[in-house]
Amino acid sequence: MPARAITGFHRDEEHHWVAELACGHTQHVRHRPPWEMRPWVESEEGRASMIGHELVCSYCDMPTLPPDVEVYRRTPTFDETTIPRGLREEHSTKAGVWGRIVVEEGRLQYEIMGRDLWVLRPGVPGFVEPEVKHRVQPVGAVRFFVEFLRVPSSE
């Protein structure tokens, strides 16, 4: 997975420290011994000393859409109570069909089976490759929709 330089810090809505990365993504940085050992995050001087240091960015490892795909269909907006069972279970798109998972509010866990797991939120969409097994799960209250994309026919 690619490593990216820390460019700054901010606190999230739950007051946890979040590192801002050069790629534009963010990553929580917590000091919770014995699982996470980051004592530097607890002081202004410690955080300042980490500017320029690199963290692995799993979001940079997420699939990206090819430049020539176009949206041809969109689902309704789902919430944590209306997510179809099929989206919560392992499934895939058809050959040639990409997906873009767009979170409007809250958080949604997106897992590519056997590969990785991401927590999507507003401004951080998930991209689905054709025929790749994946699933989603709500992380509390959420509102999201899925766009289906494909290369337009040349007819």
Image: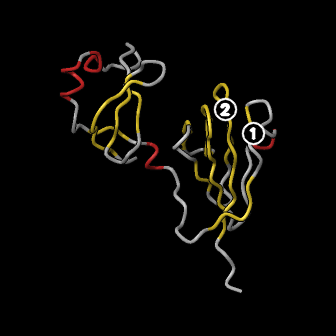
Please state the horizontal and vertical placement of residue 126, each as a whole percent of the image.
58, 47
Q: Is residue 143 left or right of residue 15?
A: right
**At label 1, which amino acid type do we have?**
Phe
According to the picture, the residue beneath numbered tag 1 turns out to be 78
Q: Neighbour class for label 1 at 10 Å: few (<14), some, many (≥20)?
A: some
Q: Pointer 2 and pointer 1: residues touching (CB < 8 Å)? A: yes
Q: Residue at x 67, y 27 (%)?
A: 141
Q: Amino acid at mark 2?
A: Val
Q: Which residue is mark 2?
A: 142
Q: Is residue 82 above or below residue 100?
A: above
Seen as rendered, the residue at the extreme top is 33
In front: 38, or 142? 142
Residue appearing at x 31%, y 30% in the figure: 9
| Number of marks in picture | 2
Tell me what residue is drawn at x 66 percent, y 68 percent.
150
Horizontally, is 142 left or right of 41 in the view?
Answer: right
